[in-house]
Amino acid sequence: MGISIRAYGRYRGVSDTAVRKAIAAGRITAEVDGTINPVRADAEWAASTRAPDPPLAAPARPARARAASGVDVDDLAGVAPVTAKGGGNTYAQARTANEVLKAQHHKLRIAQLKGELIDRSQAMAQVFALARAERDAWLNWPARISSMLAAELGVDPHTMHVALEREVRQHLTELADFNARLD
């Protein structure tokens, strides 16, 4: 005569359900009266139960490898990468990388909706249009102002217009050397 299934579960540190499953699977045997002989059951349990696998250690990845993968470790929020035995990415790594990319995409989309980001091509077009409007305004200025200045200074209006236009074009040529970088 042994002890009850519930008492053996407490003795073993498992639930009585685990003991019942072990009996049903044939890993341990119960006495004829339904009780458990703890000495024999311990031996059967140890012989038929596989030890749990140790947790896999995450190999340290150098910064160069992190940069090449395009996934920042800080973005993974504590998810340790695990390398498969073949050296490739595991499903968990691929899924984690996918989730990180989706999160980054959503972060950029929200910033764009808030007006914190603008489209680069639109910005380039706006800068180009602004520069062209500024250039055109300067090119039209000598024609608009030369006759008034000539009358005020008492010089020939055509000579004044030619001199102003020459100086404005030279100034615009100097300004054209400036290359705006928008990257």
Image (cartoon, grey):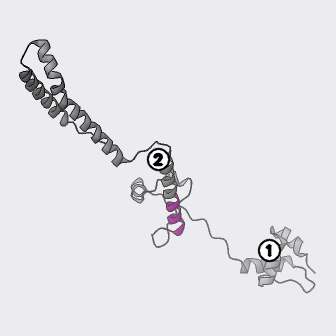
Q: Secondary structure at mark 2?
A: helix
Task: Please rate how many residues cluster around mark 1, counting C-alpha atoms within 10 Å: few if below 14, some from 14 to 19, many from 20.
Answer: some
Say if the magenta span includes residue 95. Answer: yes
Q: Nearer the viewer, residue 89 or 49?
A: 89
Corner quadrant of residue 1? bottom right
Q: Inspect the image, locate mark 2, and give the three-letter code of the amino acid beneath it.
A: Gln
Name the residue: 35% across, 46% down. Answer: 122
Q: Residue at x 13, y 20 (%)?
A: 147
> Would you place residue 160 above or below residue 180 in this image?
above
Select label 2 or label 1 by which is in front: 2
Quadrant where the C terminus is found in the figure: top left
Front position in the image: 121 or 152 = 152
Q: Residues within 10 Å of mark 2 (few under 14, many from 20)?
A: few
Segment colored magenta: 86-99
In this rendering, the answer to whether 12 lies above or below 114 is below
Q: Residue at x 54, y 66 (%)?
A: 92
Marker disc for residue 112 = 2
Q: Amino acid at mark 1?
A: Ala
Find numbered disc 1 in the image and state the secondary structure of the residue it sits on: helix
Q: Nearer the viewer, residue 104 or 133?
A: 133
Q: Is residue 139 magenta?
A: no
Measuring from the top left, give residue 152's x and y in whole percent. 14, 13
- The residues tagged by marks 2 and 1 sit, at their Cα atoms, a distance apart of 54 Å
Mark seen at residue 18: 1
